[in-house]
Image (cartoon, grey):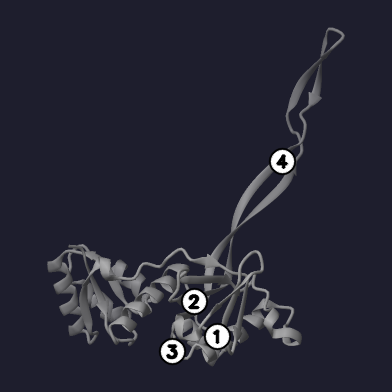
Amino acid sequence: MACTVIQTDQTSISVDQLVNAFEAIDRLTRADAMMLARQTFGFYYQGLEAEEAHALKNALESQGVPAAIVDDADLYQLPDGKTFKRLDPTDEGLIAYDVMGRPRTVAWGNVLVVAAGYVRAIQVEKHKRTVRGGGVGLAYGGGLAMPMPSAPSTEITHRGKETTRLLLEIIVNDDIGRYRADGAELLYLYLGSDRRPRCQDNFPRLVADLVSHASVAMLNQGAVSIVAAPDDPLIYPTRRPFEREITWLIWSGAHGS
């Protein structure tokens, strides 16, 4: 059985705590610990043998981090879900519109997790430029070979540009299971005349409205920070820790953490 060691409370884990704990397992390195510590919001580590799992659990607890051992299969697997471009939080429930504009209402009591966050990403941009012909070819006419410049060509390069995405994930107890949205693509029509031109201004308001209505839902740290300090929110280094935190939240909620 592959095992997972999972943190059972919400205290932050320092780099030193994780580095020290990882020394209990030979194949886990200091570099592994430092990378995970920077990306951890609710720690868990999968794919361990039973002996390794017990060693890591004991090492974490010696560092003041309470932990449990579970079967890898017991962790919640995020479903594919659906991406929506319009989400309206109303007193009656969350209304999500599909690509055909058809509404679907979810009762707030069925919303399990509201996860929102500013997530760093690399956006690949394609650049084109025309390169003038520098070589010389031969053109034949009247039995004579005449030098002719080669035709210009198009050079295409790809460059990575760091950007920040506004991500929203809502885990729901229904047949879809996962409602996904990109803040830059949402319509925010429910705001009416209060809607602003920039999505960066509308996104925190949507998150705050979702949080205020979904009173029984668990919140990730990103959503909490957006509501508490919309001008200075938590920024996730990549999408991976953003999604891992959702998995941890669902496990901890199911186990009373």
Q: Are marks 1 and 3 in contact (CB under 8 Å)?
A: no
The local crowd at label 2, few if under 14, some if 14 to 19, many if 20 or more residues have their Cα within 10 Å, is many
Residue 153 location in percent, x, y?
A: 73, 37
Gap between marks 1 and 4, in whole Å? 48 Å
Asked where in the image residue 61 lies, by quadrant, the reply is bottom left
Gap between marks 2 and 4, in whole Å? 44 Å
Q: Which residue is mark 3?
A: 216
Q: Residue pushed farthest right?
A: 142
Residue 249 location in percent, x, y?
A: 37, 80
Q: Amino acid at mark 1?
A: Leu
Q: Are marks 1 and 4 in contact (CB under 8 Å)?
A: no
**Residue 80 placement, left or right of 63:** right
Q: SS class of the residue under badge 1?
A: helix
Q: Are marks 2 and 1 in contact (CB under 8 Å)?
A: yes
Residue pictured at 53% horizontal, 70% vertical:
180
Q: Which residue is mark 1?
A: 210
Q: SS class of the residue under badge 3?
A: loop
Going from N to C along the chain, the mark reached first, 1 or 3, is 1
What is the quadrant of the N terminus in the image?
bottom left
Q: SS class of the residue under badge 2?
A: strand
Q: Amino acid at mark 4?
A: Thr
Q: Is residue 33 above or below residue 220?
A: above
Residue 112 location in percent, x, y?
A: 43, 81
The nearer-to-camera label among 4 and 3 is: 3
Going from N to C along the chain, the mark reached first, 1 or 4, is 4
Residue pictured at 77% horizontal, 19% vertical:
138
Residue pictured at 74% horizontal, 79% vertical:
197
Q: Amino acid at mark 2?
A: Ile
The nearer-to-camera label among 1 and 4 is: 1
The nearer-to-camera label among 2 and 4 is: 2
**Residue 2 placement, left or right of 158:** left
Q: Which residue is mark 4?
A: 154
